[in-house]
Image (cartoon, helix red, strand yellow):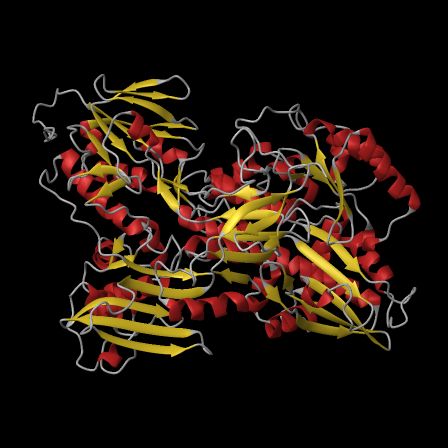
């Protein structure tokens, strides 16, 4: 029988205890919906989450893997820890529910904690499905080293650490669905050689037909990813020491691999519910009010539940379920019902736009089927019409008609007589006018369940910029494919009241000043610490996300004269080393120009033996990286090495890569080694908005890869050097723009300092030069820095000279640590993954 959850008029009635098992996207969204209906007056809300974080957007993990976002991005964390405190929600993070007593109405956690409930919501989501494969697991049931799922921050972190550990990593992704292709794309951008293995005959077979899958395959292969369809993986191949070496197939063939990512599907996480005696089929069986079968006060929501025989793996149905459940248990609408979801998908897969809805092809003889197929351009479109109703559509490459087709699929607009015009702008609403014609209940952001009506209402409530609307509604905070349409709707709804985002040009979100204005204010008010900046310039107080950029900026402005506050620094900057996957650190001593000596090599070898350092690796910047150093050993390692820091950990000037140049090379046109050493000697360790990588090459053969560095120098003969800026060769590939051609090494060094100082003062936080240079424009940079059009060069030269004069090797902290805890060991809050010793 349904529980009476209608709010009582008696103000003295005690709140009921609402427990939500699961702090993922479905559980947290349901709590948000409950709170928005006055749920905080009705319930004491407790949530249990087995990950040690607030609620985060799993859709964003593919962006993190691809280097397009970081784990610190605001868009990733939907509900940070502060949100729970501010909303009166008790969150037990890093704990997991292990038992439910339906009769005593208690939940028992792995920690031993027992929690009473009046109403229970199970939102345990789903788990990665790991097919039976020989060698997949260790004897204790754990996944073999080098095998990952792709569901959590931990999975993503593990893949990133392994992908960047060395230059020749090979990966095999098992499963060619959406998640598998996103994993492959992300790993490829990290420089990993990737193969995708898919047992069905074409990629994304759940969403695409064979032709659509073929077009997508062409696009994926163009990225340099190997694709193997019709292959069933039967074994994870491993070496004698247990290290992954590849995968084996049913046909006897194999592929080599150092890393294996399993994305072969998901399965509802129902074990907790099963052990409690709830009705389980594929998922936890629920009725139209999301109530578990035969239960009065236990509900389930999200990927763990089964409604009318359907289990959903996309986020849009989760939002619809959350709304119904919140209506029911708060009494806002006790008769609300969920009748299932008609799935429409619009997303970007490995950089390719895809939209799909309904059936993939004709199922009856009289079904109308219209296709457009152009493999050369990577475009595929199809629609299926039955009884003058759109029952299926597929767009790949060009999805400009997705908005119209979504409305047609929901039977909100009539179909044109010329069916081909459903695929092209031939009388149907165009992409340009689609925002005005969309119905209010059309879902614009599938990732976060935001409709056009939600966006329009947000604008009408006073939000008149796109960023304000995105922040309030979360539209565009998932895969990002809807952002152009969100912008169109905001523009349509706001009309003349549309405003440019006030904070778009602020250096940090909590201080309403551009970077030059902020620098000026800090200097005028002599603000030397992050806390002083917050106190004097942040109207609404401290913002944790602003601490690191402000720390960096204060070091740029004041050099050694800034007041260091450990809480404002990332661990890498606090201990001057790069934290690794297993909690140890890497030490990279300076080797200017990649040049070393027998004495330095001997010291490195001796130190590695003395401190049992498990790996020494040559880096892409022509240095040696000592990996696996314990935090407490860092000062002793630096002291025994007797070499300066190589700055492989910070947002700073990193290194100058060089070729042999004229010393030994038969083709050398300039002494690249000497010039590279001179540049690094002068500008070593300078703080900057993002890392700076440089190179000098002795001829246009480009052996030191100077054409794709932040600052690259190329000898072209007759004593002349070309200077290129804004290059990149990591997740983004970009040839640098020609800033100037000069006729002496001294002029190269001078212009290098002028460019770096201008970048230090003008670039946004974490804005690499490959984004900064196009944003400013190379013509503008030439005018400012080379021609001195605005008279700024003198000041830039003066400030870069001051910064150079203030240089202090950070590894000298070994003599006088900044705090008692700077180099003391700390027990991890969670078990850390172990890096293999090679």
Residue 645 sits above or below residue 168 on the image: above
Viewer-side residue, 826 vs 514: 826
Residue drawn at x 22%, y 37% as measured from the top left: 285
Viewer-side residue, 276 vs 672: 276
Q: Quadrant of residue 346?
A: bottom left
Q: Quadrant of residue 538?
A: top left
Residue 587 in sight here: yes
The image position of residue 250, as x and y in percent, is: 52, 52
The image position of residue 96, as x and y in percent, is: 39, 27
Residue drawn at x 44%, y 74% as measured from the top left: 378
Left or right of 592: which side holds 135?
left
Residue 446 sits above or below residue 144 on the image: below
Left or right of 378: which side holds 272?
left
In which quadrant is the C terminus drawn? Answer: top right
Viewer-side residue, 838 vs 424: 838
Viewer-side residue, 627 vs 409: 409
The image position of residue 774, as x and y in percent, is: 56, 68
Residue 545 sits above or below residue 207 on the image: above
Left or right of 244: which side holds 467?
left
Residue 506 in sight here: no
Taking the view exactly as shown, the residue that stands out farthest to the front is: 251
Q: Quadrant of residue 208?
A: bottom left
């Amino acid at each position: 029988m349904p529980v009476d959850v209608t709010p009582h008029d008696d103000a003295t009635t005690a709140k009921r205890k609402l427990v939500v098992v699961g702090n993922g996207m479905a559980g947290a969204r349901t709590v948000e919906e409950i709170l928005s209906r006055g749920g905080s007056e009705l319930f004491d809300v407790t949530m249990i989450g087995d990950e040690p974080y607030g609620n985060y957007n799993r859709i964003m993990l593919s962006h993190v893997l691809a280097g397009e976002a970081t784990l610190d991005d605001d868009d990733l964390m939907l509900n940070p820890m502060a949100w729970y405190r501010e909303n009166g929600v008790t969150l037990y993070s890093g704990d997991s529910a292990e038992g439910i007593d339906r009769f005593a109405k208690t939940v028992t956690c792995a920690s031993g904690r027992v929690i009473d409930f009046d109403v229970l919501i199970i939102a345990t989501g789903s788990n990665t499905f790991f097919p039976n494969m020989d060698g997949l697991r260790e004897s204790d049931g754990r996944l073999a080293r080098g095998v990952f799922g792709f569901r959590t921050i931990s999975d993503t972190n593990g893949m990133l650490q392994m992908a960047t550990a060395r230059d020749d990593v090979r990966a095999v992704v098992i499963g060619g669905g959406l998640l598998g292709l996103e994993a492959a794309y992300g790993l490829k951008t990290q420089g990993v050689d990737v193969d995708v293995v898919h047992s069905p005959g074409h990629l994304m077979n759940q969403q695409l037909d064979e032709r659509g899958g073929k077009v997508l395959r062409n696009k994926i292969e163009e990225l340099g990813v190997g694709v193997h369809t019709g292959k069933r993986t039967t074994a994870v191949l491993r070496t004698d020491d247990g290290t992954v070496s590849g995968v084996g197939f049913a046909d006897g063939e194999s592929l080599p691999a150092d890393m294996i990512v399993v994305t072969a599907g998901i399965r509802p996480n129902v074990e907790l519910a099963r052990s409690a005696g709830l009705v389980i089929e594929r998922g936890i069986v629920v009725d139209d009010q999301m109530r578990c079968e035969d239960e009065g006060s236990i509900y389930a929501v999200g990927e763990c539940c089964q409604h009318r025989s359907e289990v959903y793996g996309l986020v849009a149905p989760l939002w619809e379920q959350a709304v119904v459940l919140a209506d029911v248990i708060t009494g806002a609408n006790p008769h609300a019902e969920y009748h299932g979801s008609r799935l429409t998908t619009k997303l970007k897969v490995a950089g390719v736009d895809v939209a799909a809805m309904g059936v993939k092809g004709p199922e009856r003889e009289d079904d109308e089927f219209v296709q457009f197929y152009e493999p050369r351009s990577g475009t595929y479109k199809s629609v299926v019409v039955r009884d003058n109703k759109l029952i299926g559509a597929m767009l790949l490459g060009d999805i400009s008609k997705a908005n119209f087709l979504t409305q047609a699929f929901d039977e909100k607009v009539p179909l044109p007589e010329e069916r081909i015009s459903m695929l092209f702008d031939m009388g149907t609403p165009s992409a340009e006018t689609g925002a005005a014609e969309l119905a209010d209940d059309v879902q614009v952001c599938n990732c976060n369940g935001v409709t056009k009506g939600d966006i329009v209402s947000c604008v009408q409530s006073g939000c008149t910029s796109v960023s304000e609307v995105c922040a309030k509604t979360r539209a565009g905070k998932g895969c990002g494919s809807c952002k152009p349409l969100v912008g169109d709707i905001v523009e349509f709804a706001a009309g003349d009241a549309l405003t440019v985002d006030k904070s778009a040009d602020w250096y940090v979100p909590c201080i309403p000043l551009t970077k030059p204005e902020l620098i000026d204010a800090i200097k005028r008010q002599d603000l030397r610490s992050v806390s002083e900046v917050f106190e004097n310039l942040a109207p609404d107080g401290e913002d944790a996300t602003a601490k690191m950029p402000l720390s960096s900026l204060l070091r740029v402005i004041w050099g050694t004269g800034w007041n260091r506050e450990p809480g404002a620094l990332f661990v890498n900057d606090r201990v001057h080393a790069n934290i690794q996957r297993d909690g140890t650190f890497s030490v990279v001593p300076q080797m200017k120009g990649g040049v070393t000596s027998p004495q330095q090599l001997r010291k490195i070898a001796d130190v590695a033996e003395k401190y049992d350092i498990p790996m020494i690796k040559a880096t892409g910047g022509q240095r040696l990286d000592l990996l696996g150093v314990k935090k407490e050993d860092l000062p002793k390692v630096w002291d025994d090495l007797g070499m300066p820091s190589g700055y492989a950990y910070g947002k700073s000037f990193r290194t100058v890569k060089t070729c042999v140049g004229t010393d030994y090379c038969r083709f050398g046109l300039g002494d690249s080694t000497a010039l590279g050493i001179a540049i690094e000697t002068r500008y070593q360790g300078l703080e900057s908005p993002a890392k700076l990588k440089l190179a000098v090459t002795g001829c246009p053969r480009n052996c030191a890869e100077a054409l794709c560095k932040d600052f690259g120098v190329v000898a072209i003969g007759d004593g002349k050097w070309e200077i290129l800026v804004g290059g990149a060769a990591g997740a983004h590939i970009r040839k640098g723009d020609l800033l100037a051609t000069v006729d002496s090494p001294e002029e190269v060094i001078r212009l290098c300092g002028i460019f770096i100082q201008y970048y230090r003062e003008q670039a946004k936080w974490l804005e690499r030069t490959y984004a900064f240079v196009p944003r400013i424009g190379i013509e503008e940079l030439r005018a400012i820095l080379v021609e001195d059009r605005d008279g700024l060069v003198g000041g830039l030269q003066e400030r870069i000279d001051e910064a150079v004069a203030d240089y202090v090797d950070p590894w000298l902290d070994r003599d006088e640590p900044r705090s008692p805890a700077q180099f003391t060991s700390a027990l991890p809050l969670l078990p850390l993954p172990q890096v293999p010793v090679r």
